[in-house]
């Protein structure tokens, strides 16, 4: 079901973004707690990193179809 | 009369009407009430009756006067003959038929008399007066022959009878005559003896007694002879008449008999005549002798008288005279005798003198008598001779005739022989000719028959061959027909099977429920493949079924529709995403566009798509419309125009739709084909 792919992608994307965000947040929290004396910037940094990674992943995932794969083109 | 009666009846009726008016009040009421109208009706009835009666009476009178009219009326009006018969009696016969009957009756009477008159066989020609048909010639000849035979028989019988009777009579007569002759001669002898003999008186008396006896005998014999002669004459006359009659019959076969009879007759007549002449001569002699005896008697009487006159006492009879006379008497007697002698001498002298005269006279007389006798004898002799001559002539004639007949017979025989020879020759020749002809005819006929036979047999053979051929051809035809039928049935069965399998296939398409594809079409497709071994088209078609449908089945249109409805929103959301625009931001924009853009849910697609219509939203609405209207194909086509992510999103749907469409197309083709094949194999009634 090709129509479910998008959904699946979004699911993944969301899941991934959740994870990433969560992980980033967590890491940020951790780093902020651990290393960066409870500054919020590692949390935001971490969540930003997480979000960014998630966004990138999501985007990548969403546009993965359109990417010309070398293996496929060969 | 009828009219008068009718008038009288009418008058009495009217009178009755009038009379009973006063007497019977009940009826009077009727009469008084309806008298005027009754009177009018009665008048009409009376007038009608009068007319009818007058007509009938007039008809009867005229029929009485004119029979033709009567006949016409009787012919045309039924029961009128009864009425007319009652009134006038039976019709008088004035027609032509009774006249004919009368004529016929007269004719018949004439015919009877003529028939009775003409008994002669020659005039027995039946055409004269009888209205019967002519008897055939053979009959006539037969009748004539029969009649001749009969007459001949009758004639012969009569001849024989008369001959025999006449012979008998003649013989009798002859015998009687002979007896008479003998008696006469005896008598004369006796007389002579008595006259001349000088015998003793007893014997004289005995002699005289004998003489008397002889005389009696003679008279008796003569009478007998006369009667016999008359009888014989009668018989001879009858014989003559019979002979004449037989002669008159003109039957040739009787002629010798007639001749013989005639000869016999002649002989009898001759004999009779001879005997009669003998008798006559004897009689004449006897007469002479008797005369002489009479004379002597007379003389003796005279003498006796003289003697008696002389001697009256002697009762002298001749007998007594001889023995009982006395001498005186004797003397007287002698004297008387002398005297007598003298007298006698004188008479003798006288006689001698007159002898010549007497002799002449006697001679004359004798001549006369002789002449008479001669004439008679001559005439009889002439007659006899004539008769003899005639008989001789007839005999000669008959002999001659016989001879002639014999000769003629011989000639005829010769002629017949010649004729038979000739006929034989001719017959031989004819036989030859006929044989030749017959053989020719036979041969030709045989040939004809042969040819005909051959022809017929050939015809038969040909017919038979033809029939056989036709039968064979028909058989062949039938076989072929049966085979073709079988084949057609096979075809039909196959087509039916195909159709059934196709229908099954078709049915399997329907087994798709919502979201559940159909059962795999493999089985049905296999069935279809099985049922169409020989049809390449069907095989191709059945092999053209997409694999997916075979193994997995296809989705129904409804499910596709439903899916599309859910797809549509998704496709709307990713409408802006394509190869170049596929970042998240684009996604966001696309989502925003989808949220903000409102299009028709369903829009009828135009016949031709222009570039504006390639807008995904429009396409989706077109496709939606098409789907809603059941046109999956157009929807698929329209959906196929989606590009980018939307396309990717609906890819599966599209393939599914394509699959469904393909399968449906194939199945419909197969179905059409099966229908066509089925129709093709259907035999027209």
Image (tube, rainbow, N blue to C red):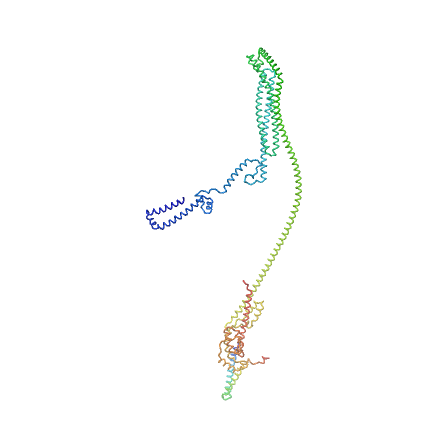
Position of residue B610 in the picture relative to residue B390 (left or right): left
Along the line of sight, the residue nearer the viewer: A9 or B360? B360
Along the line of sight, the residue nearer the viewer: B600 or B285? B285
In the rendered image, residue B52, in percent from the top left (x then y), is placed at 41, 47
What quarter of the picture does the C terminus of chain A occupy? bottom right
Position of residue A72 in the picture relative to residue B594 (left or right): right
In the rendered image, residue B417, in percent from the top left (x then y), is placed at 66, 39
Along the line of sight, the residue nearer the viewer: B212 or B71? B71
Taking the image as drawn, is residue B422 in sight? yes
Q: Is residue A72 above or below residue B11?
A: below
Taking the image as drawn, is residue B648 in sight? no
Q: Is residue B650 above or below residue B458?
A: below
Position of residue B612 in the picture relative to residue B437 (left or right): left
In the rendered image, residue B36, in percent from the top left (x then y), is placed at 35, 50
Residue that extends furthest to the top in the rendered view of this protein: B328
Residue B84, image quadrant: top left
Q: Is residue B349 above or below residue B379?
A: above
């Amino acid at each position: 079901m090709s129509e479910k792919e998008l959904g699946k992608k979004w699911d993944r994307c969301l899941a991934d973004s959740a994870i990433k965000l969560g992980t980033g947040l967590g890491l940020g929290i951790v780093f902020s707690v651990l290393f960066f004396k409870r500054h919020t910037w590692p949390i935001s940094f971490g969540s930003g990193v997480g979000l960014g990674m998630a966004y990138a992943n999501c985007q990548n995932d969403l546009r993965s179809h359109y990417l010309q794969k070398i293996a496929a083109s060969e | 009369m009828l009219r008068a009666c009718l008038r009288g009846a009418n008058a009495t009726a009217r009178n009755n009407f009038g009379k009973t008016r006063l007497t019977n009040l009940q009826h009077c009421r009727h009469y008084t009430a309806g008298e005027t109208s009754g009177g009018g009706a009665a008048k009409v009835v009376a007038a009608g009756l009068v007319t009818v009666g007058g007509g009938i009476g007039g008809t009867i009178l005229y029929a009485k006067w004119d029979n033709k009219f009567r006949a016409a009326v009787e012919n045309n009006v039924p029961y009128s003959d009864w009425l007319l018969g009652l009134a006038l009696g039976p019709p008088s016969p004035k027609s032509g038929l009774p006249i004919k009957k009368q004529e016929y009756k007269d004719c018949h009477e004439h015919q009877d008399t003529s028939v009775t008159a003409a008994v002669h066989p020659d005039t027995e020609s039946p055409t004269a007066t009888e209205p019967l048909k002519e008897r055939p010639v053979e009959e006539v000849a037969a009748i004539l022959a029969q009649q001749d035979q009969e007459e001949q028989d009758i004639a012969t019988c009569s001849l024989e009878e008369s001959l025999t009777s006449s012979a008998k009579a003649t013989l009798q007569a002859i015998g009687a005559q002979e007896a008479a002759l003998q008696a006469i001669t005896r008598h004369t002898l006796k007389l002579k003896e008595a006259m001349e003999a000088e015998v003793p008186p007893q014997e004289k008396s005995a002699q005289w007694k004998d003489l008397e006896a002889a005389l009696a005998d003679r008279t008796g014999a003569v009478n007998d002879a006369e009667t016999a002669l008359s009888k014989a004459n009668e018989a001879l006359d009858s014989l003559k008449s019979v002979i004449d009659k037989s002669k008159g019959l003109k039957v040739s076969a009787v002629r010798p008999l007639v001749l013989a009879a005639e000869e016999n007759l002649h002989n009898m007549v001759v004999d009779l005549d001879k005997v009669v002449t003998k008798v006559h001569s004897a009689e004449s002699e006897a007469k002479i002798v008797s005369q002489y005896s009479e004379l002597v008697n007379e003389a003796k009487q005279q003498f006796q008288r003289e003697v008696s006159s002389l001697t009256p006492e002697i009762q002298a009879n001749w007998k007594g005279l001889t023995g009982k006379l006395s001498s005186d008497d004797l003397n007287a007697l002698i004297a008387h005798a002398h005297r007598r002698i003298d007298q006698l001498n004188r008479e003798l002298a006288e006689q001698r003198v007159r002898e010549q005269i007497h002799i002449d006279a006697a001679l004359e007389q004798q001549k006369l008598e002789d002449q008479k006798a001669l004439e008679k004898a001559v005439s009889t002799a002439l007659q006899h001779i004539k008769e003899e001559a005639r008989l001789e002539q007839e005999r000669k004639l008959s002999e001659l005739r016989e001879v002639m007949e014999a000769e003629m017979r011989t000639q005829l025989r010769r002629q017949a022989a010649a004729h038979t020879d000739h006929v034989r020759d001719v017959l031989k020749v004819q036989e030859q000719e006929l044989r030749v002809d017959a053989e020719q005819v036979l041969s030709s006929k045989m040939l004809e028959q042969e040819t005909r036979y051959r022809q017929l047999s050939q015809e038969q053979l040909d017919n038979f061959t033809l029939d056989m051929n036709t039968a064979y051809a028909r058989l062949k035809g039938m076989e072929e027909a049966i085979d073709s039928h079988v084949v057609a049935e096979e075809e039909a069965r196959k087509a039916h099977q195909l159709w059934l399998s196709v229908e099954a296939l078709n049915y399997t398409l329907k087994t798709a429920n919502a979201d559940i594809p159909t059962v795999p079409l493999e089985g049905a497709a296999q069935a279809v493949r099985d049922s169409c071994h020989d049809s390449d088209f069907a095989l191709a078609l059945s092999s053209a079924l997409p694999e997916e449908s075979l193994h997995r089945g296809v989705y129904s249109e409804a499910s596709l529709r439903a899916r599309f409805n859910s797809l549509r929103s998704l496709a709307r959301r990713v409408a802006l995403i394509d190869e170049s625009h596929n970042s998240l931001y684009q996604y966001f924009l696309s989502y925003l566009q989808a949220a903000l853009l409102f299009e028709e849910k369903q829009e009828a697609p135009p016949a031709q798509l222009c570039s504006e219509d390639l807008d995904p939203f429009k396409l989706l609405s077109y496709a939606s419309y098409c789907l809603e209207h059941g046109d999956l194909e157009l929807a698929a086509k329209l959906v196929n125009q989606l590009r980018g992510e939307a396309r990717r999103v609906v890819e599966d749907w599209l393939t599914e739709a394509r699959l469904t469409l393909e399968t449906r197309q194939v199945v419909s083709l197969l179905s059409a084909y099966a229908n066509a094949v089925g129709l093709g194999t259907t035999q027209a009634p």
